[in-house]
Image (tube, grey):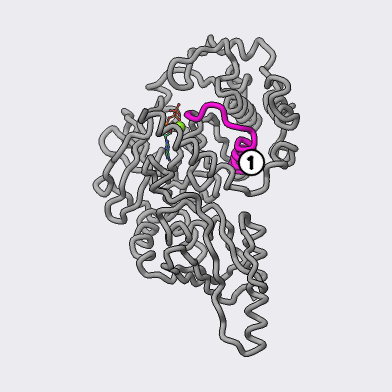
Amino acid sequence: MDTQTVVVRIRTPDSKDMDWTVNGSLQLTFRDVLDVISRVSPDVVTTAFEYEDEDGDRITVRSDDETHAMFSYYLGILQQMHLCGQMKEPLNIFPRACKPAGKRNIHGLKVNTKMSIEKRLSSSGPECLSTKSLQNSSTEFVNIMANGQIREEDIECQDILGHGNGGTVYKAHHCPTGNTLAIKVILLDITQEVQKQIMSELEILYKCSSPYIIAFYGVFFVENRVSICTEFMDGGSLDIYGVIPEPVLGRIAVAVVKGLTYLWRLKILHRDVKPSNILVNTTGQVKLCDFGVSTQLVNSIAKTYVGTSVYMAPERISGEQYGIHSDVWSLGITFMELALGRFPYTQIQRNRGSLVPLQLLQFILDEDPPALPQGQFSAPFEDFITQCMKKQSKQRPAPEELMIHPFIDQYNDENTEVLSMWLCRTLEERRSRAVT
Ligand code: ATP
Ligand code: MG
């Protein structure tokens, strides 16, 4: 029954309804539908949508399960229509938006969900958008990205999104298709041989496809610069948000654990889990970036920028073997920082960035790990941090244990609205503070 083509009619308040033809509707996720809605109404941030049941009552959809239930219900209705010889009616859905972007998103930030949906459309085939205007530039973009044909001359750098130890990240415009990207430009003095090695080590990024991992669009070298092109996230990284409330943090933690589990399954260790490498967007997505797939790239950067990351696990600081458990320590210390709004070891002073001289980290080796202050956070969250930050690496939770930890389990509800709302509000507050 799922092979049946269905027409979803996206009903907008301004009556510019759009029909979307879908095959394999039962495979669609909540995010797929939101992505398409955001392309129909790019100026509003949609966090949920509704459909009508047989009695005309509106049912709200906010998760994959509810999306699946909606399509199952509609396929049943279609069958009834068929049996009764009735004309097929499209499935009407009604996006539920926050305030119009112009009012609420005073940064003028735009949610760029085009690429992810098109990537999936191009790889999985059957679903298609019925509107031509939506297809043109996007198909071209997918082809360019899929073939690794992104070129420096096609890119116009706009704002600087931030500086790291390794380079500078720009928001950029891909001129041939009009899409927005993030480009990390790193200055490196390396031979052509090393360039080739880096290119081939980064190949695996084309194969990474997860809603919890930043999409990779390509890499190119020009003179002594390497430019790495990825999906742009309009909320930036988590290091700028100070204290993040636990219900928001819980949803972020679920996404980060899912992202790490995905990488670990591909035998990729992240190696650099920290707040600045967790990116968020105003549709409530959370994605990991900057994981160390290229040893050559990591080594080449390390030659220029000396220091040791304060998020490193004790066994890494003391030069022992690195494994999944080391990522789990970094996960723990990262979430402790995000809950407290400061780096958990008060004794370790950082200037800018996360690198310090190795000697400063002796404290992490000598002392007991910090714990969250009692009574301010839920017991599951306190325990999650304690478990992840066990000094003995083997005592930290394994991936499957992380997923079923009560803190993760409690927030594993696919509710993207909590983060989306909090992020929009926080960005708005930051913006008005900057203006006054
Ligand atoms: P380090 O170099 O030690 O890893 P870092 O993670 O802060 O530190 P970069 O990775 O260079 O440094 O990133 C700089 C900043 O650019 C980040 O803090 C983040 O705010 C922003 N940024 C990076 N990638 C993106 C992206 N895809 N979308 C939006 N903002 C991004
Ligand atoms: Mg980074």
**In this view of the protein, can residue 193 be seen by the observer?**
no
Instruction: Tell me where the magenta segment starts and ends, as one range.
Output: 240-259
- Image point (57%, 47%), residue name: 417
Task: Give yes or no for residue 431 being in the magenta stretch.
Answer: no
Write down the quadrant of residue 428 in the picture: top left
Residue 111 in percent (x, y) is at: 43, 49
Write down the quadrant of residue 267 in the picture: top right
Residue 29 in percent (x, y) is at: 59, 58
Q: Tell which of 165 and 74 is nearer to you.
A: 74
The N terminus - image quarter: bottom right
- Image point (36%, 57%), residue name: 141
Quick check: 166 left or right of 396?
A: left
The C terminus - image quarter: top left
Query: What type of secondary structure mainly makes up the magenta span?
Result: helix
Task: Give yes or no for residue 246 being in the magenta stretch.
Answer: yes
Quick check: 356 left or right of 156?
A: right
Q: Is 425 located above or below residue 153 in the figure?
A: above
Q: Is 262 located above or below residue 29 in the figure?
A: above
**Under tag 1, what secondary structure?**
helix
Residue identified by numbered label 1: 254
Q: Tell which of 370 and 186 is nearer to you.
A: 370
Residue 51 in percent (x, y) is at: 60, 66
Tell me if mark 1 has few (under 14), some (14-19) or many (20+) residues whose alpha carbon lies within 10 angstroms of its own. Answer: many
Q: Amino acid at mark 1?
A: Val
Residue 74 in percent (x, y) is at: 63, 72
